[in-house]
Image (cartoon, rainbow, N blue to C red):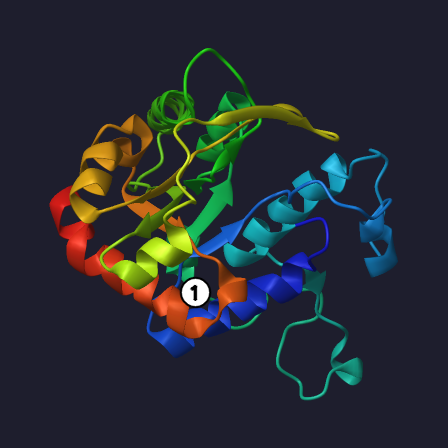
Amino acid sequence: MRYENPLYLAEEAASLYQLSGGRVALGVSRGAPEVADRGWEAFGYKGEAPNGADVARAHPEAFMSAVDGYGFAAAAPLDRQYPNMFQPDSALQVFPMVPELRKHIFYGSGTHTSAEQTAKDGLNLMSSTLVSETTAEPLGEIQADQISCYHAAWKEAGHAWTPRVSVSRSIFPIVDGADMQMFGMQASGSDQVGALPDVGSTTVGRTYAAEPDKLIEQLKADPAVMSADTLLITTPTGMGVDVNVKILENFATNVAPALG
């Protein structure tokens, strides 16, 4: 969100919602560490924090304010309006307006603190294959605890609807020799712990690559996957459409039904 125009994004998201008949799941977040030095400033956005954290907070707030229908500007005097549509000084909303759009927006969280803040902000929770925390526990345990904190904070906030939670995993079902040749060596037996600039300690999830029966067993043992409403699969987009379609078809046909 450091690089996004929040008002324009609100208009785009609402337009997409209408065009798709509500088939929208939009994920936003602060964004990952990058190679640019204060790159958001090249896009016209200013902030005080060296990592853009203040911009990353202000932009989602402005975005959600627009999504919720709050005015972003005042209508001009009638002699300066064309056509004459609004009472002077009345609040102007972004168009189109979609009251249900908020329920389709996920915020990417990497810590217990940001998960709780996401709940307070009234947004669905999205957790990736990386979290900005390390403990003695694997990624699935850390995320499951974050999800629990999120649900507790959501209940305390008193929002009037039921949120969704998604987690991401790198998964390669192996159903034939071609799959084995491409992905058989991708499997990793454990998570990785490291550090990222401006983030600190991180836990990166393992890669799952196995026959469907084994994948089902492994994913059922992942507490975050079992706690989430939605499982997102990260795919190797650089390998082309056909390869990625096959990965998704293999998962949908041979793995997903057993996960519920």
Q: Amino acid at mark 1?
A: Val
Quick check: 131 left or right of 74?
left
Q: Position of residue 89 (x, y in %)?
A: 71, 65
Q: Secondary structure at mark 1?
A: loop
Residue placed farthest to the bottom in the image?
Answer: 83
Which of the two residues, 211 or 158, is positioned nearer the viewer here? 211
- Asked whether residue 92 is in view, the answer is no
Residue at which label 1 appears: 98
- Asked whether residue 74 is in view, the answer is yes
Q: Dividing the picture into quarters, in which one does residue 7 lie?
A: bottom right
Q: Dividing the picture into quarters, in which one does residue 125 lie?
A: top left
Q: Position of residue 191 (x, y in %)?
A: 46, 27
Which of the two residues, 179 or 73, is positioned nearer the viewer here? 179
Which of the two residues, 176 or 36, is positioned nearer the viewer here? 176
Q: Position of residue 17 (x, y in %)?
A: 41, 69
Quick check: 97 left or right of 242?
right
For the C terminus, the image quarter is top left
Quick check: 27 left or right of 32?
left
Residue placed farthest to the top in the image?
Answer: 136
Q: Is 215 placed above or below 63 here?
A: above
Q: Is 231 placed above or below 82 here?
A: above
Q: Position of residue 90 (x, y in %)?
A: 65, 64
Q: Which residue is found at the position 39% from the left and 67% from the top?
A: 243
Mark 1 neighbour density, 10 Å: few (under 14) some (14–19) many (20 or more): some
Q: Which residue is found at the position 63% from the left and 75% from the top?
A: 86
Q: Which residue is found at the position 15% from the left and 43% from the top?
A: 213
Q: Which residue is found at the position 39% from the left and 52% from the top?
A: 183
